[in-house]
Structures are given as structure tokens and as C-alpha cells.
Image (cartoon, helix red, strand yellow):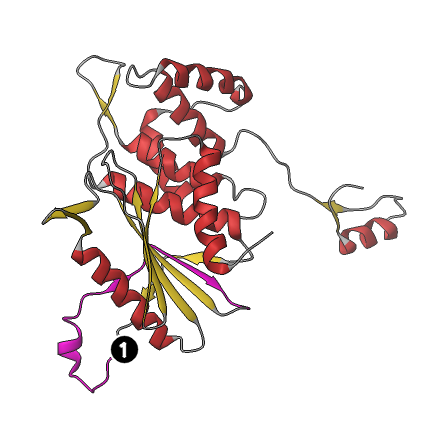
Amino acid sequence: MRGKIDLDGTIQLKVAQRLQVSCDFDEFSEDNQLNQVLKATMLLLLGSAQVKSARRKELRQLLPFFQNVREVPRAQLRTMLEQALTMTYQRNNQNYRVLVNVCYFVLMSWLNSDQSGQFKMREFTDEQMPKLFEKFVLEYYKQEYSPRLSAAASEIKWQIDDHAPASHLEQLPGMHTDITLRDEPNQRMLIIDTKYYTQSLLRLYGKDLLKSPNFYQIYAYVKNAAEANPDYEVGGYLLYAQTQGDVQPSLRVSISGNQLGAVTLDLNQPFDRIKKQLNGIADAYFQITD
């Protein structure tokens, strides 16, 4: 038998004196939308002189695994990407989530050049890279720590003491976290706000300081989240992409019972080391030992 037994269909077959069982099953094919997105991205990167030769060699070694995946016409890429970004991921395809987000930024950065049939990839702008960094960290924790921790970009409500007019409350800035990790059984919460700058620290009077708006932002997030969740232990970290500066953000303090800090992630290293750094942040805060 294959798949799930269709009881009604089997009864009908029995009535017809046919010794068969009716089953429902899904046909899985490697030529699916997600693999088509991956292949389209690989092909574009292979044709770019901006991609290092070592990377292109790795891509060429992977491409044979996609030989049964059809190439999507360029005119259909945008629609296909938008569909892939909004699809619901299940256990059997959740590994695609991070890859599809990366593919989106790569494919959307390609422009037609003056020569027919050629492509030119523009540099990621200052707007794109912070968003890519934020999405990468969020999707990493979603994939690696589920179901132990829940990971989401969430909204924090201001904990207003008085009954201010609604028109006044509308003027308050929104508080939307990049990543909120929650350990429901142990009632612990960690808010992470990612930062991607050329210079992470501010040099002032001979000292390297965190930028005031960054720290005040995470402080406001944590304090309001803690008041809204009185049974939870709430902490907050600023997560900076490492720069070439001599001094990198590295801070852990406790303020009024809440753990606050700033940590740095080196993106210019093999993925297993990036993974180790990200795991270290969550494991240390949530006291995960296994």
C-alpha cells in the first residue's frame, strides 16, 4: 500500500468484488517552485564576474543536482519569488525558508545591462543589507530552535500609565522587534535588535561608545515587554554585524533586573562558526546545555 487508505473508496471496491485498497498519496517532484528559485539564483551567480571563482566552482558542483529542475523564464521570476516568500512552510520544506529569502535579495538586485542577454548585479544598498541581516538571524532561530524556542518579529505595546487621548497615543513611535525569542515553559524572553553599520561604535572623548539611540531603543523594548509580561524574565541584546574596526560592541549589564547587552556577529567566516556564535547567544541566555 502507498499513502493513506481511502476507506470510502475501499468499501466501493469491495462492493464491486475487487480485491483492491483505495489510497490517497502525494506525488513529490524535484521540479518544484522552491528548487526553481534556487536554480535561477545559481545560474545568475555563475554568470557574474563579481562572484569569486572559488564560489562559482562550488556552484557548478551543485548544479548537476538540479538537472531535472526546469529553468524559469526571467519574466516569471518576480511572480514566482513573491509566491515563494508568502507560502506556508512545513516540516518537510522548512530548510528552504532562509535560502529563499537570500535568493530574493540576490534576484531582485539583477538589472538588465546595455548588451542583450547579459545581466549586471548591482551592489546591495544600505537599506537592503540591514534587512537581509535581520531576516537571516530571524529565520536561523526559527529553523534551528523550534520547537524549544518560538522566534518571531513581534510588536511591543507601550505600557501607558494614564488615560491619554487616543490622538496623543497615535503619536508614539511603534515598537517592532527584529527577533523575539520566547521559552514559554520557563517564562523567559529575549529581544534581539540587529544592526548593520559601517561603524558600530561612536568615538567620543577618547572612548568607544554604543550609539545612544540603539541602546535606548532596546532598553525601551525590554522595559515595556517586561511590564506587559510580569511573569517573564525579559532581556535584550543589540546584535551588530562585525566591522573592520579595532573595537567591536561587547557589553552585558543588568539594569533594574533586566539583562541588556550588545554582541557582535562575524559574517566573514565559515557558516559553522556563524552558527556557533548565534547558538551561543541563545544557549547562554536560555541556559540551554544540550
Q: Is residue 161 magenta?
A: yes
Q: Secondary structure at mark 1?
A: loop
Nearer to the camera, 40 or 24 = 40
Res 252 visible: yes
Residue 203 as seen in the image, left or right of residue 263: left
In magenta, the rendered stretch is 160-185
Q: Where does the image place residue 147, in percent across and percent down from the top left?
A: 56, 56
**Residue named by callout 1:** 159
Nearer to the camera, 162 or 227 = 227
Q: Is residue 192 magenta?
A: no
Q: Residue at x 33, y 19 (%)?
A: 51
Q: Residue at x 32, y 73 (%)?
A: 256
Residue 248 location, quadrant:
top left
- Residue lying farthest to the bottom in this orientation: 163
Task: Report the quarter where the N terminus lies.
Answer: top right
Residue 210 as seen in the image, left or right of residue 71: left
Nearer to the camera, 288 or 17 = 288
Q: Where does the image place residue 14, in percent across and percent down from the top left?
A: 87, 51
Residue 253 location, quadrant:
bottom left
Q: How many marks?
A: 1
Q: Residue at x 47, y 55 (%)?
A: 284
Q: Is residue 64 above or below residue 24?
A: above
- Residue lying farthest to the front in this orientation: 206
Q: Amino acid at mark 1?
A: Gln
Nearer to the camera, 180 or 240 = 240
